[in-house]
Amino acid sequence: MFEWVGYIKGPEGTPYENGHFVLDITIPNDYPYNPPKIKFNTKIWHPNISSQTGAICLNVLKSEWSPALTIRTALLSIQALLSDPEPDDPQDAEVAKMYKENYSLFIKTASMWTKTFATGPKMEPREVIIKKITEMGFTEDQAKNALIKADWNETVALNTLLENL
């Protein structure tokens, strides 16, 4: 079993826009034959995600999983769920009720939760990130190239560099 941390951005045009959501990913020993277990670590107001535990109600993570699917596919499916909630198959009944009965309040609440809980990490200046990586023994060009490919995410860039050793 492997424990990973994933990140997704809130989709544009949704109350989750500009949100930086952290997900806990548990990959079972029999993956890809069984789906990863994924839950939100970041608090979120969404009918298909528990506002208490972060559990996600999404068929592709349960009955519709196929060994042909990947972690990337699962994350993209979760991001799509943020754009298109399914309040008739809720994980959080209170949120689903608000979504169906008072949509404008749902939007306000989801936006407030995004601004409150999904602010994401504070970005350091690029020079500082490059310096940190070069101090680990990588060249400046290696650091810059990895960071550009990783959209300046230091952890992803460093993991990529370490995997290529």
Image (tube, rainbow, N blue to C red):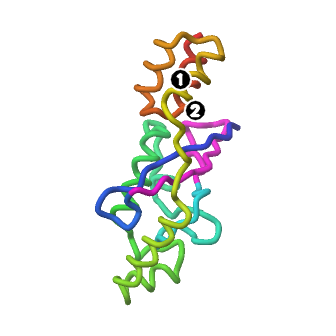
Q: In this view, does 108 lie to the left or right of 42?
A: left
Which image quarter: residue 105? bottom left
Q: Does the magenta stretch include residue 117?
A: no
Q: In this view, does 58 lie to the left or right of 133?
A: left
The residue lying toward the viewer, choosing from 81 and 154, is 154
Q: Is 142 above or below relative to 130?
A: above
Nearer the observer: mark 1 or 2; the answer is 1
Q: Quadrant of the N terminus?
A: top right
Residue 85, given in percent of the width and then of the height, sits at 38, 68
Residue occupying the point 48% across, 74% down: 90
Q: Circle 1: is it few (<14), some (14-19), or many (20+) Cα within 10 Å?
A: many
Q: What residue type is labelled 1?
A: Ile
Q: In this view, does 101 lie to the left or right of 119?
A: left
Q: What is the count of numbered marks?
A: 2
Q: Is 137 above or below relative to 33?
A: above
Looking at marks 1 and 2 on the same chain, the residue that comes earlier in the sequence is marked by 1
Furthest toward the left, the residue is 13
Residue occupying the point 53% across, 23% down: 130
Furthest toward the bottom, the residue is 101
Q: In which quarter of the image is the C terminus?
A: top right
Question: Magenta part of the protein: which range?
Answer: 18-38
Residue 151, given in percent of the width and then of the height, sits at 42, 33
Residue 124, given in percent of the width and then of the height, sits at 54, 38
The span from disc 1 to disc 2 (Cα, nearest Å) is: 12 Å
Residue occupying the point 58% across, 65% down: 43
The residue where tag 2 is placed is: 155
The residue where tag 1 is placed is: 130
Q: What residue type is labelled 2?
A: Thr
Q: Is residue 42 left or right of residue 141?
A: right
Helix, strand or loop at label 1? It is helix
Q: Is 27 above or below relative to 47?
A: above
